[in-house]
Image: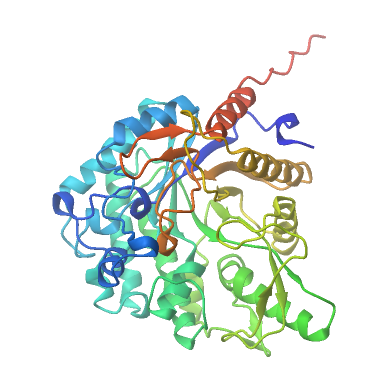
């Protein structure tokens, strides 16, 4: 059934998402320190097409314009990330008031427009200063991150509705293991050290936020795919189990069960009782980022030993991912079936990259509308089956820097002209606006009269 025919609960949160490095620009303005992504871009002459995040969408200087676009879209929730080096340039101790003031204006602007702020503490751009001290390979990083989280909690804890500690630790683990921004290639043993330190940082941050008296809910956002075997050969089935352990269970299991997944009868990470207690600090919700499923075949790649295979007949998007929105439900059903104590879920990212262009003052993106509509239908079906899903955030509000892929892939509901920085709402923007409005106009249940 099409999403337009579905009704969601009146309290369901309708949002869009962004990340600081991808949209803010102003990379060294007003006391901001360099992030690891600034360093990567400048060291290697830019990412695809020579791109950097130096200007990006210039959101830092165009905040009011972007807030007005959110207001006209009808969002009830907006997920953004804080640039850690913008507020704490060295990653420790001293705070940068100009950076804090920017996020205060953002949060206040959201609340003024009736939009709940969803603040992500870490969307990959940690200060270069802490990377120089070992980054995520250094266990001390977890404590530095927790101090940053607690400081943000003290400053914004009375106004932020939801807090996300870490976005996609799997992606961070892969990039850190490679020593670059490329989230692919072989995994080394150090990647599991990074994974463990990220989980410790999450647990410490949850405790730090609660200690700071935050009023909002606290969670983490994981990128999940939903894996299936390429065939019924025993080698493919074994490879799929390995992929599930790596891409789904490596973070879910320790967070929700207190155990790392097993490989050859042993946990992939040895974990002390004290660390286990920290990692399993209760969370209020689980954020799920979903774009595409994964088809797995036997292969020699990396620490976990499997390879991705193409889905026969499936179209691929600009990043080479299969466009199969109906598989979203497969992942959601797997999640509900495997984690009986699953906390409430928020879909924190979901979107489709397209080579959008402005023609005659408009951007026609029917493929994105179809994709998002079908994903929403899968969410509604999962809710009808009993899954507790409470919100949805499109990736992304704006076209932006897609990390090492540069500016060519466009995920936004709003087109950005990177020469002029002009914003043009796409057809998908107006579709989502109307969809949200229709949900908010739901008729109330008639009062019963005896």
Residue 372 place in picture, x, y as percent: 64, 42
As drawn, the residue found furthest toward the front would be 360
**Camera-side residue of 120 and 311:** 311
Q: Which quarter of the picture shows residue 204?
A: bottom left
Relative to 400, 305 lies left or right: right
Query: What colouring style does the render use?
Result: rainbow
Q: In this view, does 178 lie above or below 208?
A: below
**Camera-side residue of 179 and 79:** 179
As drawn, the residue found furthest toward the top would be 449
User: Quick one: quadrant of the C terminus?
Assistant: top right
Q: In this view, does 281 lie above or below 67?
A: below
Residue 137 place in picture, x, y as percent: 37, 80
**Camera-side residue of 323 and 419:** 419
**Camera-side residue of 385 and 272:** 385
As drawn, the residue found furthest toward the right would be 232
Tell me which residue sits at (27%, 39%) in the image.
104
Q: Can residue 115 be seen in this view?
A: no
Residue 102 place in picture, x, y as percent: 24, 42
Q: Which quarter of the picture shows residue 420?
A: top left
Tell me which residue sits at (41%, 42%) in the image.
215
User: Quick one: quadrant of the N terminus?
Assistant: top right
Tell me which residue sits at (71%, 54%) in the image.
324
Residue 159 place in picture, x, y as percent: 36, 37
Q: Which quarter of the picture shows residue 132?
A: bottom left
Relative to 246, 102 lies left or right: left
Q: Is residue 314 visible?
A: yes
Tell me which residue sits at (48%, 41%) in the image.
357
């Amino acid at each position: 059934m099409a999403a337009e025919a579905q009704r969601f609960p009146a309290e369901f949160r309708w949002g869009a998402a962004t990340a600081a490095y991808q949209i803010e620009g102003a990379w060294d303005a007003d006391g901001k320190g360099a992030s690891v992504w600034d360093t990567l871009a400048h060291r290697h002459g830019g990412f695809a097409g020579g791109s950097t995040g130096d200007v990006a969408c210039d959101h830092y200087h165009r905040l009011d314009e972007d807030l007005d676009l959110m207001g006209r879209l009808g969002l009830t929730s907006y997920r953004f990330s804080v640039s850690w080096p913008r507020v704490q340039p060295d990653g420790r101790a001293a705070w940068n008031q100009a950076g804090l003031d920017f996020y205060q204006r953002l949060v206040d602007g959201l609340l003024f427009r009736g939009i709940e702020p969803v603040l992500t503490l870490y969307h990959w751009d940690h200060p270069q200063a802490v990377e120089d001290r070992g980054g995520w390979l250094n266990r001390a990083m977890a404590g530095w991150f927790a101090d940053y989280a607690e400081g943000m909690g003290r400053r914004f804890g009375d106004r932020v509705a939801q807090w996300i500690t870490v976005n996609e630790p799997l992606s961070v683990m892969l990039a850190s293991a490679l020593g670059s921004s490329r989230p692919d290639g072989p995994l080394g043993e150090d990647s599991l050290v990074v994974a463990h330190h990220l989980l410790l940082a999450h647990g410490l941050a949850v405790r730090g936020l609660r200690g700071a008296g935050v009023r909002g809910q606290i969670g983490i956002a994981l990128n999940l795919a939903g894996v299936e075997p390429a065939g019924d050969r025993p080698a493919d089935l074994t490879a799929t189990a390995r992929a599930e352990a790596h891409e789904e269970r490596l973070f879910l299991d320790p967070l929700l069960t207190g155990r790392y997944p097993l490989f050859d009868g042993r946990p992939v990470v040895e974990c002390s009782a004290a660390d286990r207690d920290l990692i399993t600090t209760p969370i209020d919700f689980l954020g799920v980022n979903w774009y595409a499923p994964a088809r797995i075949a036997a292969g020699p790649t990396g620490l976990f030993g499997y390879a991705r295979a193409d889905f026969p007949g499936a179209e691929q998007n600009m990043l080479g991912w299969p466009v199969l929105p109906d598989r979203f439900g497969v992942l959601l059903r797997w999640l509900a079936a495997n984690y009986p104590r699953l906390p409430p879920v928020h879909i924190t990212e979901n979107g489709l990259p397209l080579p959008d262009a402005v023609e005659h003052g408009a951007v026609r993106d029917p493929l994105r509308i179809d994709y998002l509509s079908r994903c929403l239908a899968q969410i509604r079906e999962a809710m009808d089956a009993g899954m507790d899903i409470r919100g949805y955030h499109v990736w992304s509000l704006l076209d932006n820097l897609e990390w090492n892929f540069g500016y060519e892939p466009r995920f936004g509901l709003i087109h950005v002209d990177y020469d002029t920085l002009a914003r043009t709402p796409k057809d998908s923007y107006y579709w989502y606006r109307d969809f949200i409005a229709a949900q908010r106009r739901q008729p109330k249940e008639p009062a019963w009269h005896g």
